[in-house]
Amino acid sequence: MSKALNNPGGNGGGGGPHRDYGAMADSTPEVSFAAAGGSSGFSPTEFMSLSEDIGHNITAIHSSTKQLEKQLKLIGTPKELPNLREKVHTINTKCNARVQTTSQDLQRLQAVVRHGDRQQKLQLEKLTREFHGVVEKYSNLQRRISSAMRQTLQQAQQFADQDVEANTRAELLQQQRLEQAHLQQEHDMLDDRRRQVEQIESDIIDVNQIMTQLSGLVHDQGQQMDFIENSIEQTAANVEDGTSELAKAARSRQSYRRKILILLVIAVIIGLIVTGVIVAKLNS
């Protein structure tokens, strides 16, 4: 498992070797849990590696959310730069890749801790809850940014329409031509802006899909914990029954030995009596 993680665009948390989950992706992310193949035993090394990677990516997703919050405050203000939408899309693309890979790592970690102890299972539940919270916040922020950009786009479209209307009333042909060229440029910019907004809208992650899959993991983990507890109780009951049976067998064996000893004593006494009788007859 590769652990060389570079901190892309300041999205991540602290240093240390981790996997780079900030790869670019153009299509809408589909977060899913692939069936994880695993070994038959518990690997402490793999458990620690996966836990560290998941924790690092949770921190990186949180950092990306903070960056998006700053960009949201600039939308519709004089400080909004032309490259803001491209910057938001870049952050979304890298963060979506982290969400996708972290979801797969959680699936793999769930398979690993099946052979671990209770502490490792609690660690899985903790990481799952933290991932749930940070992804939900990130997804909600994506929707807010998309809505704000759509609103500013509509306002810009209204202003452009007003300019067109004013231009039709222009008296000078030369001025009208100049205005038309300017309006055409504005429409081209609006078309490009519209494509960027639609691209950002396509980046939005369906947090409900992720949470449904994660809730299945938590449910399976709870069933495993219940099965382990029931097995422990059953084992304790079996040990207690076995101890009782061993005690009964020991008492039966001691009783049998006493009976054999009594029979031997009686046989010896009878032998002595018979011997005495025979000796007495021989003497007479």
Image (cartoon, helix red, strand yellow):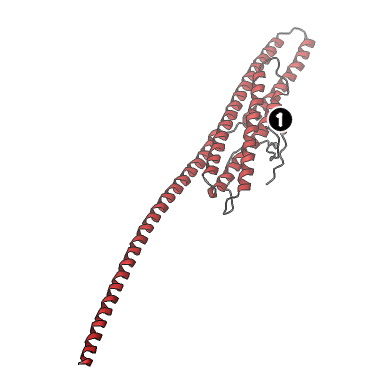
Q: Amino acid at mark 1?
A: Gly
- The residue at the point 59 percent across, 30 percent down is 139
Q: How many marks?
A: 1
Q: Would residue 168 appear left or right of 242 to someone viewing this image?
A: right
Q: 150 or 252, which is in the foreground?
A: 252
Q: Residues within 10 Å of mark 1 (few under 14, many from 20)?
A: few
- The residue at the point 46 percent across, 48 percent down is 228
Q: Position of residue 258 (x, y in %)?
A: 30, 69
Q: Would residue 165 appear left or right of 281 to someone viewing this image?
A: right
For mark 1, what is the residue? 10
Task: Place residue 21 in its image quadrant.
Answer: top right
Q: Does residue 196 appear anywhere in the picture?
A: yes
Extreme right residue here? 174
Position of the C terminus, as image quadrant, is bottom left
Q: Position of residue 118 (x, y in %)?
A: 51, 44
Q: Would residue 11 appear left or right of 233 to someone viewing this image?
A: right
Task: Place residue 87 in its image quadrant.
Answer: top right
Q: Position of residue 88 (x, y in %)?
A: 68, 27
